[in-house]
Amino acid sequence: MSSLRLHYASVVGTAVVFVLSLWINQEVFTHTEFVRGVNWIYLPSGVRLLSTLLLGGDGAIGLLLASWLVDFFYFFPHDPVRSFAGGIIATVAPYAVYRLALERYNLRSSLTNLTAKRLLVLALAYSTANPLLHHIWFFLQGDTQNIVNRFFAMFVGDLAGALIMLYAMKGILALLPTKRQAGA
């Protein structure tokens, strides 16, 4: 597969998986919604973090496009400024954590050097950065009603979703045969 096709597939694949995770989250965890777009369990946060950890910039571009798609057409169709800013903010947080993982943990594309402890640290970093950036935006827009409770709900939802997705993926990858096992 050519490099351009691989980048395109990574971007489109990320967008599709993100939208699918959002749909699953809406179907399974609809009763956990605190306010529109903020759930006590938010699986798409795990997809955001995992996509950037696995695909870097391609994952971030896919997330940005998917975030804009759902923000403009589903969550906030009558608020284009919030949709535009929300998509950017939702992409910056996981990408920043990816950059942190590159520098701090010498991240490998296979994620083999991410231990359970390191995954927890990255999930906590993302789950803090994402609601912090969103709530700074809300504050700057004058939306301060119930801001502490919304921040806490978003933090918990992002952390729960990230941990579920990250550890599920880590478990699935652990079940796959290694090169040594495959030849045995």
Image: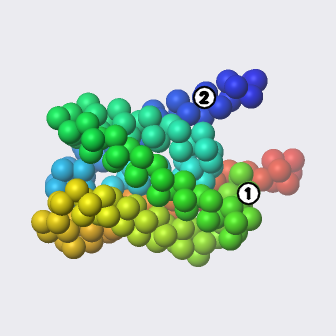
Amino acid type assigned to the residue bearing label 2 in the image: Ala
In this view, 168 is above or below 120: above
Residue corresponding to mark 2: 9
List x then y, in percent, for residue 123: 49, 66
The residue sitting at the left extreme is: 145
Other residues around mark 2 within 10 Å, as few (<14) / some (14–19) / many (≥20): some
Residue position for label 1: 108
17 or 88, which is in the foreground?
88
Secondary element under disc 1, as helix, strand or loop, is loop
Q: Position of residue 104 (x, y in %)?
A: 68, 71
Instruction: Residue at 60% x, 39% y: name it.
Output: 58
108 horizontally vs 142: left or right:
right
Task: Check residue 14 in the rendering and tell me which mark sits there, or answer none.
Answer: none
- Determine the residue positioned at 59% across, 58% down: 98
Above or below, 139 against 24 in this view is below
Q: Choose between 81 and 35: the one closer to the eye.
A: 81
Residue 116 visible to the viewer: no
* Residue 122 locus on image (x, y percent): 54, 68
Return the disc, 2 or 1, that comes first in the chain's sequence. 2
Quarter of the picture containing the N terminus is top right
Which residue is drawn at the image coordinates 60% and 72% (left, top)? 118
The reply, left or right, for residue 65 in relation to residue 179 is left
Snapshot quadrant of residue 164: bottom left
Marker count (numbered)? 2
Is the C-beta separation of discs 2 and 1 under 8 Å? no
Residue 158 % position (x, y)? 37, 61
Amino acid at the residue labelled 1: Arg
Horizontally, is 11 left or right of 82 in the view? right
Is residue 91 visible to us here? Answer: yes
Residue 33's image quarter? bottom left
Q: Is residue 36 above or below residue 102?
A: above
